[in-house]
Amino acid sequence: MIYITRRERFNAAHKLYRQEWSDEQNLEIFGKCSNPNWHGHNYELYVTVKGEINPETGFVIDLKELKRIITVYVTDVLDHKNINL
């Protein structure tokens, strides 16, 4: 069994905030993470694929296809986006 891991990086913004609380209570509980202008993080995503080597291709998975899947389902959805919206 072979494991292939790919790392992708992306940036996204969010805030910690409960609408049923006052701004003061949100600030007390969540601190600067409740900032009304949001705040951002740099994320690292590790995707690991496990499998046998395909004797025809010599691959467990085509890394270009893995990159495409991560791009479509993660990076395009989250990179430089507000994840609360």
Image (cartoon, rainbow, N blue to C red):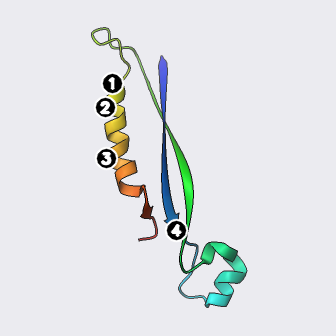
Q: Secondary structure at mark 2?
A: helix
Q: CA distance from mark 4 to mark 1?
A: 33 Å
Query: Which residue carries the number 3 mark?
Result: 72
Q: CA separation, marks 2 and 4?
A: 29 Å
Residue at mark 1: 62
Q: Amino acid at mark 2?
A: Glu
Mark 4 or mark 2, which is nearer the start of the sequence? 4
Q: Tell me the SS state at disc 4.
A: strand
Name above or below for residue 78 compared with residue 84.
Answer: above
Q: Amino acid at mark 3?
A: Val
Query: Furthest residue to the left?
Result: 56
Q: Secondary structure at mark 3?
A: helix
Q: Residue 65's mark?
A: 2
On screen, residue 49 versus residue 31, left or right, reads left
Which quadrant of the view contains residue 32? bottom right
Which residue shows up at 40% across the image and 16% down it?
52
* Residue 69 falls left or right of residue 11: left
Q: Amino acid at mark 4?
A: His
| Labelled pair 2, 1 in contact (Cβ < 8 Å) | yes
Q: Which quadrant holds the C terminus? A: bottom left
**What is the spatial separation of the Cα atoms under label 2 and label 1, in whole angstroms?**
5 Å
